Image: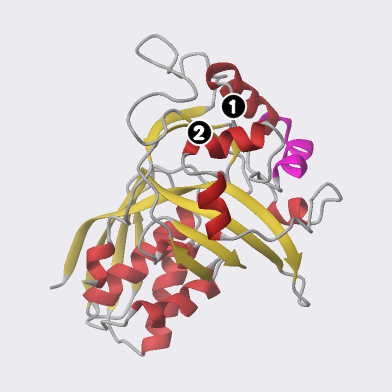
């Protein structure tokens, strides 16, 4: 095999994101529930015999040394592999959104090259390498929805039903370092447990309602993000007007609202009437209807 085509790199949503402490080295300790969604990039990998690593942009132009190339380089160096690769990427997930698109691309490259270069490393060997590339990469090397802790490296798979979401992204990015240094950031949220989550939020309706009533399941980064970029507040307000609720995902600037509770029947809101539910978004904004995934679409690459 010298080529893998149509590899899916799904985005993710953080149904909540808590900052529960800080390590001695300054890294923040997090807890979150991550869901992969069907808003995705598509990658094609072709093995090269000369050891060179090259990327070809089929959509928007990406930075010269993006996470895809960094992932390929890291795996090449760690494995001592002499092969190279041509990476062609159709970029659909917006960056600077808190959707994890770049991290997912990197994980897809690691998954694909693990097969294409005949390495066949187990997941446990790829995970530490992924963690050196970014906090979200280990999640995208996982099996699907997960309870995520630590600095992103501690994963507990969670069975979570597929659900529909409206996701909006204003045309701004957020400086993550500025958010984590903000005095508005809560850093001492009481640690929770998977069992507590499943008891308090058996479906999306309960989870979102818990935040709306001041409950414990929230995004601790949201107040700082809204203070830095008012567009985040505008996105949440737009979703709240249409669906009765909204929250930021990750470190923003994208926000989302749940449309159903996993049964296919509306539970919190109904879609706006008309063929385009995002017709009244401000110019330059992006909106998309998404569905969460019950398993990672490339899980069989570890089979």
Is residue 204 visible to us here? yes
The residue where tag 1 is placed is 245
At label 1, counting other C-alpha atoms closer than 10 Å, the crowd grade (few under 14, some 14-19, many 20 or more) is many
Please state, as top left, top right, bottom left or bottom right, where the N terminus lies in the image.
Answer: bottom left
Which residue appears at 71% of the width and 48% of the height?
220
Which residue ends up furthest to the front in the rendered image? 199
Q: How many marks?
A: 2
Which residue ends up furthest to the left in the rendered image? 1
Please provide percent x and percent y for residue 84. 30, 76
Is residue 98 visible to us here? no
Q: How is the image coloured?
A: secondary structure
The residue where tag 2 is placed is 205
Magenta stretch: give its range: 222-231
Q: Is residue 252 magenta?
A: no
**Vertical placement of residue 157 versus 166, above or below:** below
Spatial CA distance of label 2 from label 1 is 10 Å
Please provide percent x and percent y for residue 30. 65, 61
Please provide percent x and percent y for residue 51. 31, 80
Please state, as top left, top right, bottom left or bottom right, where the C terminus lies in the image.
Answer: bottom left
Which of the marked residues, 2 or 1, is nearer the chain's N terminus? 2
């Amino acid at each position: 095999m010298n080529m893998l085509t149509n590899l899916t790199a799904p985005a993710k949503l953080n149904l909540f994101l808590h900052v529960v402490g800080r390590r001695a080295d300054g890294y923040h300790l997090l807890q979150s529930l991550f869901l992969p969604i069907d808003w995705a990039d598509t990658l094609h990998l072709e093995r090269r015999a000369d050891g060179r690593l090259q990327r070809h942009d089929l959509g928007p132009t990406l930075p010269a040394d993006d996470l895809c190339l960094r992932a390929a380089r890291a795996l090449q160096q760690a494995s001592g592999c002499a092969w190279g690769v041509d990476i062609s990427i159709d970029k659909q997930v917006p960056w600077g959104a808190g959707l994890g698109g770049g991290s997912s691309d990197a994980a897809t490259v690691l998954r694909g090259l693990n097969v294409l270069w005949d390495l066949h490393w187990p997941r446990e060997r790829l995970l530490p390498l992924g963690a050196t590339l970014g906090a979200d990469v280990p999640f995208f090397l996982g099996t699907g929805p997960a309870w995520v802790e630590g600095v992103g490296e501690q994963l507990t798979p969670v069975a979570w039903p597929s659900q529909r979401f409206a996701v909006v992204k204003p045309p701004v990015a957020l400086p993550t370092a500025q958010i984590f240094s903000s005095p508005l950031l809560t850093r001492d949220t009481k640690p929770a447990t998977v069992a507590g989550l499943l008891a308090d939020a058996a479906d999306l309706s309960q989870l979102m309602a818990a935040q709306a009533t001041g409950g414990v399941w929230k995004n601790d980064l949201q107040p700082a993000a809204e203070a830095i970029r008012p567009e985040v507040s505008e996105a949440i307000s737009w979703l709240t007007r249409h669906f009765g609720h909204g929250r930021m995902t990750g470190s923003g600037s994208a926000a989302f609202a749940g449309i159903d509770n996993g049964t296919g029947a509306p539970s919190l809101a109904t879609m706006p009437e008309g063929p385009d539910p995002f017709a009244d978004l401000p110019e330059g904004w992006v909106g998309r209807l998404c569905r969460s995934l019950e398993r990672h679409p490339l899980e069989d690459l570890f089979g």
